[in-house]
Amino acid sequence: MKKIIMNGANTHIMSIKIDTAFNYFEKYNKARNLAQATITAYYKNYAYFNEFLKHYKEKTGIDIKDCNQVTEDLIIDYINFMLDEKDIKKTTINTRITHIKAFFMYCFEHAYMKYFKISKLKLQKELKELYSDNDMQLLLKKPNLEVCCFEDYRNWVVANFTYATALRLRSIVNIKIKDISFQSKQIFIGHLKNKKTVFLPLGEMMADILKEYLSYRQRRARRLLVL
């Protein structure tokens, strides 16, 4: 990537449409092999910014189409628009700022607009409510396999696996049977957010849960074939 001229003294700013620059940005992200969820988030938050630009045109009569029309004052107006006219949480506003900032940083680096600072809202951190010991006991209580449906049993296995590994759901759903080694007591994880691959240890209790689940699922599949 090009070095950003931080003092805003860019003298060779290109004339380019915002939509065109965003198309280039999307191609660039695809070439970087970013996660599809990240690319989708950039697109969604660009749509939110375009929604603001329509409001801005109705309010001021100014139609913002080119990158060099985007200024620090415009971004401040965008933030105030979200604060004043949108019923959204401040944490959500910061998420939108973060994603649109990534696009604008790309524009700064390619001399599509002059550099300016983009800051998020200052927020007081809130402590998330944690599950109590009783909550965890209920969540991890094994269902009666004689009466429960397969989905409830499967969800119980996933809850235990999440508790044991602290993995994100996206990583868990991509685990294959071949990734589990009961002999070495390890699980291969190939779908992490940072695109790294790791081997996680497999404890005795979780190994027993997975063995039983795989056996139960196999028996269930044979019954379905017979029916």
Image: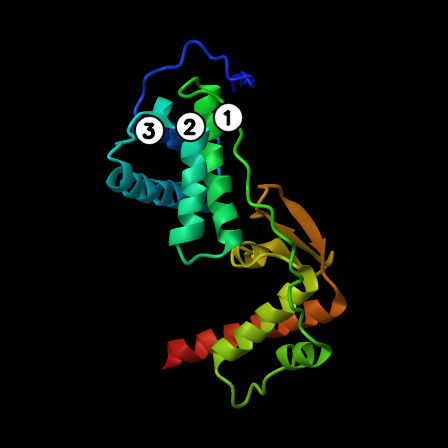
How crowded pointer 1 is (Cα within 10 Å; few <14, some 14-19, many 20+) is rated as some
Marks 3 and 2 in Cβ contact (< 8 Å): no
Answer with left or right where residue 51 lies relative to residue 136: left
Tell me which residue sits at (62%, 57%) in the image.
167
Q: Picture coordinates of residue 77 (x, y %)?
A: 41, 39
Q: Badge 2 is on which residue?
A: 71
Foreground pick, 72 / 133:
72
Answer with left or right where residue 129 lies relative to residue 98: right
Q: Badge 1 is on which residue?
A: 116
How far apart are the two marked residues, 1 and 3, measured between alpha carbons? 16 Å
Foreground pick, 73 / 87:
73
45 is higher (above) or lower (below) than 157: above
Marks 1 and 3 in Cβ contact (< 8 Å): no
Answer with left or right where residue 170 lies relative to residue 164: left
How crowded pointer 3 is (Cα within 10 Å; few <14, some 14-19, many 20+) is rated as many
Which residue occupies the extreme front position in the image?
60
**Quick one: SS at disc 1?**
loop
How far apart are the two marked residues, 3 and 2, measured between alpha carbons? 13 Å
Q: Picture coordinates of residue 117 (x, y %)?
A: 53, 29
Which residue occupies the extreme bottom position in the image?
147
The amino acid marked with disc number 3 is Ile
The amino acid marked with disc number 2 is Thr
Q: How many marks?
A: 3
Marks 1 and 2 in Cβ contact (< 8 Å): yes
Quarter in which the C terminus is drawn:
bottom left
